[in-house]
Amino acid sequence: MMTRSLFKAVALSAVLAAGLLAAPATQAAVLNGIYDTDSSKGLPASGLSFTQNLYKEYVALSNDRDNRGDNVDGELFNHKALLAQRRAGVQIDTVGDRILNDQQRTVFYQATNRLNFVYDAGGRELAPLETAVGQVAFDCWIEAEERKDQKDSAGCRKKFEDAMAAAEQKVKYTLGQVEAPPAPEPAPAPAPVQVPPQEYYIIPFVFDSTTMIPEGEQQLSKAIKDLKDLDQLKISIRAHADRSGADGYNVKLSRRRAEAVLNRLSAAGIPQNRLRIVEAVGESRSMVPTGDGVKEQRNRVVELDLRQ
């Protein structure tokens, strides 16, 4: 099929870009006209939990297609497994690149939006297994739908929907659902003020992403420990974006970063009634002044303020 040939070319381009074909000759066999469906097998899973699960799921899907005699898709999913094992970015199949009718495209665009919501809400960190299973099940489903294999398509679709439902439960809080309660009336005999070892945290994020850089993960873990140890502490959250994108986009990006932090707090057992204020300010209140369009790591942050 023309589309599968196109996918093969796309997969090979991605692998070349990631340097995967600079591997031993057995892994480069595809350059000699032989379908490469085996080079990902038996490699150690590496990276974060999401990436490890992604690798294992793509290996299983590649094996399934290879066993069916579908070498083209077996090779495609083998290359995706290799990318995951090398901790490179692995994208889902693009709806427009598959031969589908308008009704099918609508269904898969909706599924893509659902998966993107889970990504943006921190699914890779909060629900790594479910999010990885959902991504690979999407690829399985859209490929089976193009082949007109209704039984396989239905099975992959159910696996996708079950994984998404489980992931969505783990990333269930969005900023619109969070209401910081009004300040309580002063108590007649207030308890002694608790002071954490560190009262203010800066959590940096990856460019144009809701994923924290390693320093941000460390800072959030410290903040969560303080909040668990000192149960009277309240939390103020302010999320930012740098000035490299449009104003409206940056407000939405900062909102998703706030949601990622909220979901991590929720997963750690920190209740919403400990929130004092939650703000998503985009680029309007930069931590470091810059010109418009400037990428600045110090502005891609969420502030956590535990000061009373």
Image: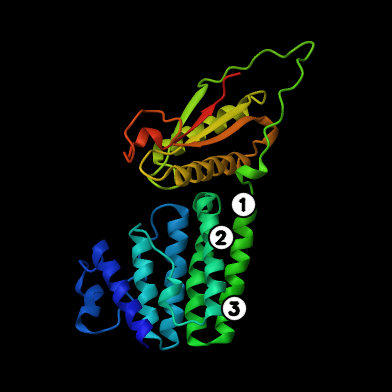
Q: Which of 232 and 67 is in front in this view?
A: 232
Quarter-of-image position of residue 296? top left
Where is mark 1, residue-wise?
A: 170
Point out residue 68 in the picture as x, y percentages from the top left corner: 45, 87
Q: Which residue is under mark 2?
A: 130
The residue at the point 37 percent across, 68 percent down is 80
Dots 3, 2 in contact, CB < 8 A:
no
Q: In which quarter of the image is residue 206?
A: top left
Q: Kindly report the distance in space between the C-alpha atoms of the residues bearing marks 3 and 2.
A: 16 Å
- Dot 3: within a 10 Å radius of its alpha carbon, few (fewer than 14), some, or many (20 or more) residues? some
Pick the front one: 8 or 58: 8
Q: Name the residue under label 3.
A: 155
The answer to whether 135 is drawn above or below residue 48 in the figure is: below
For disc 2, the neighbor class at 10 Å (few under 14, some 14 to 19, many from 20) is many
Q: Position of 187 compared to 308: left or right?
A: right
**In the image, residue 1 lies at what x, y percent?**
37, 88
**Which is nearer the N-term, disc 3 or disc 2?**
2
Q: Which amino acid does label 1 sit on?
A: Lys
The amino acid marked with disc number 3 is: Gly
Q: Which of marks 1 and 2 is nearer the N terminus?
A: 2
* CB within 8 Å, label 1 to label 2: yes
Give the vertical position of 97 relative to 236 (above or below).
Answer: below
Name which residue type carries label 2: Glu
Q: Residue furthest top?
A: 189
